[in-house]
Image (cartoon, rainbow, N blue to C red):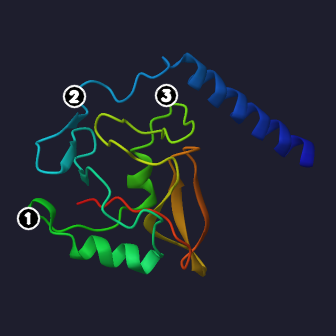
C-alpha cells in the first residue's frame, strides 16, 4: 500500500516538474492580467479581485487577528478591504519566477518590493483553531503551519 501511494506522489511531482520546466523563465503574469490605475491598487483582470499594491503592515509582520484588523481598517482608494482566502492569495504566486534572496515569486511590476516570505490568508485550519493557512512567496507553497499568534505579512484584497 505504501509503495502505491509513493508511486502516485512521485508521478504527480514529476508531472508538475515537467509543466514548470515548460514555462518560460521569468515570464511573469500574462500581458494585461494586472492593471494598475495609480491609486495604490492592482486590478486582476483574470480573477476580478482588487489588491493592495504595496504593503503597509509592519515590516516584521503581524498576528492573524492583527492582520484582519489592519485590512478591515484600511481605506485605500475609498474601498473596504479584507484578508484574502488562501485560494485567492495563491492566484498571486508566479511559478515562473524563482524566488531568491529578497526576490519573491510574484509579478514584481504589479507588486513591487514584495518580500519572499509568508503572508496570512483568512482561511483557518479546519479543526485547528490555533492555526491558519498562509502562502509563502519564497516557495510558492501554502501551508497551515502558521500559528495565529505568529508574525506573517498581509496583502489586503477586495
Judge the density around disc 3: few (<14), some (14-19), many (≥20) Cα neighbours within 10 Å: some
Measure the alpha-carbon separation of dots 2 and 3: 17 Å
**Numbered circle sitting on residue 25:** none
| Residue 1 seen in this snapshot | no
**In the picture provided, is 13 more to the left or to the right than 57?**
right
Task: Name which residue lies at 27% across and 38% down.
Answer: 46
Judge the density around disc 2: few (<14), some (14-19), many (≥20) Cα neighbours within 10 Å: few
Say which residue label 1 marks.
78
Name the quarter where the C terminus is drawn.
bottom left
Q: Nearer the viewer, residue 130 or 137?
A: 137
Task: Name which residue lies at 46% across and 48% down.
Answer: 115
Task: Name which residue lies at 48% across and 76% down.
Answer: 63
Front position among marks 1 and 2: 1
Q: Nearer the viewer, residue 100 or 30?
A: 100
Q: Nearer the viewer, residue 130 or 7?
A: 130
**In the picture provided, is 92 more to the left or to the right than 71?**
right
Measure the alpha-carbon separation of dots 1 and 3: 33 Å
**Extreme-left residue of the structure:** 78
Say which residue label 3 marks.
96
| 59 over 47 or under it: above or below | below
| Residue 93 seen in this snapshot | yes
**Counting residues from the N terminus, which is met first, the one under dot 2 or under dot 3?**
2
Q: Position of residue 129 (x, y in %)?
A: 57, 82
**In the picture provided, is 156 more to the left or to the right than 20?**
left
**Numbered circle sitting on residue 32:** 2
**Counting residues from the N terminus, which is met first, the one under dot 1 or under dot 3?**
1
Q: Nearer the viewer, residue 74 or 8?
A: 74
Q: Position of residue 36 (x, y in %)?
A: 17, 40
Amino acid at each position: 500500500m505504501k509503495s502505491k501511494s509513493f508511486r502516485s506522489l512521485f508521478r504527480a511531482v514529476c508531472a508538475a516538474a515537467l509543466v514548470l520546466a515548460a514555462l518560460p523563465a521569468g515570464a511573469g503574469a500574462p500581458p494585461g492580467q494586472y492593471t494598475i490605475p495609480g491609486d495604490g491598487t492592482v486590478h486582476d483582470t483574470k480573477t476580478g479581485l482588487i489588491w493592495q499594491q504595496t504593503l503597509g503592515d509592519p515590516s516584521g509582520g503581524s498576528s492573524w487577528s492583527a492582520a484582519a484588523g489592519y485590512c478591515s481598517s484600511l481605506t485605500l482608494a475609498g474601498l473596504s478591504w479584507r484578508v484574502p482566502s488562501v485560494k485567492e492569495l495563491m492566484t498571486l504566486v508566479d511559478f515562473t519566477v524563482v524566488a531568491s534572496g529578497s526576490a519573491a515569486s510574484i509579478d514584481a511590476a504589479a507588486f513591487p518590493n514584495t518580500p519572499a516570505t509568508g503572508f496570512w490568508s483568512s482561511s483557518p485550519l479546519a479543526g485547528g483553531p490555533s492555526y491558519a493557512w498562509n502562502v509563502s512567496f519564497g516557495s510558492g507553497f501554502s501551508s497551515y503551519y502558521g500559528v495565529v499568534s505568529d508574525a506573517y505579512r498581509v496583502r489586503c484584497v477586495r
